Image: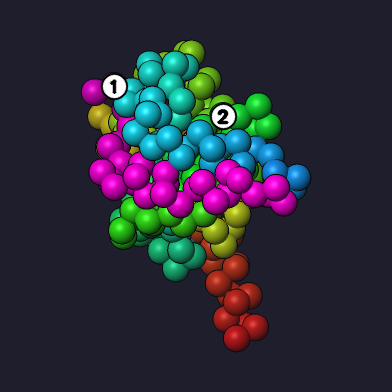
Amino acid sequence: MPINFAKPPAAMAANLAAALPRLAGSANLEARAPALTRAAARLATGDAMRIATTLADVAGSDAVTTPVYLLGLEDLAAGRIVQGAKLKLWAQILPTEAGAVSAEARASDARFSQMSNGISVGRFRNALTRMAAAPPADDGEVAQLRIPALEITLLWLKGGRSGDRFEVVDAPPGVLTNGQSFSAAELAAALKPHAASRLANRNADG
């Protein structure tokens, strides 16, 4: 099985197209974050966007769409990486001349949730571009795994023949190193102490 992309909810493109014209026309947003207004204008075209469906499509696509899973500290501390990850968002990531932008819709109803041009967005797209230029031996379905409490974002190859694989896209220094690759068991072993420490501090404060 090659590396591929999950099909987003059918209503996502139309919902983004309906929600984003207001942002595309915002002079205040253009002054503060031009990447967001430029991305909003392009995403407002809806179904006209060329969306990658396989890794080979990335270079010629307008955007890539990935499911976004969130993982909480309790599941992480218990070693439940795949089992604990909850699908919460769908992200449509596209490059602009002012940087990569992620327009995100809720997984529950495909409604617009937020836009971001944070550093992890560009790093995620760069990881896919690099992977497309030199396809790895791994396979699976592209997803994002975010661990908000630890400020970590990973590229997740789900359900490959050799099991789930995770590449660190963005993480604080001293926790993980960007570009590192892990199996689910290896990731759990690396992060369980950090999760347990954060939970202990939270419980002490509470």
Q: Give above or below for 139 relative to 145.
A: above
Residue 195 drawn at (x, y percent): 54, 63
Few, some or many C-alpha atoms within 10 Å of disc 2 (few <14, some 14-19, many ≥20)?
many
Is 127 included in the stretch rendered in magenta? no
Residue 137 drawn at (x, y percent): 37, 19
As measured in the structure, the alpha-carbon distance from the residue carrying label 1 to the one carrying label 2 is 24 Å
Q: Residue at x 64, y 49 (%)?
A: 26
Mark earlier in primary sequence (1, 2)? 1
Residue 70 drawn at (x, y percent): 43, 56
Q: Give above or below for 162 relative to 146.
A: above
- Please indicate, yes or no, whether residue 205 appears anywhere in the rendered image: yes
Q: Amino acid at mark 2?
A: Pro
Residue indicated by mark 1: 2
Q: Give above or below for 85 relative to 43.
A: below
Q: How many marks?
A: 2
| Left or right: 162 in relation to 58 | left
Judged from the image, the secondary structure of the residue bearing numbered disc 1 is: loop
Quadrant location of the C terminus? bottom right
Few, some or many C-alpha atoms within 10 Å of disc 1 (few <14, some 14-19, many ≥20)?
some
- Please indicate, yes or no, whether residue 138 appears anywhere in the rendered image: no
Quadrant location of the N terminus? top left
Residue 188 drawn at (x, y percent): 45, 51
Give the residues drawn in magenta, as a range.
1-29
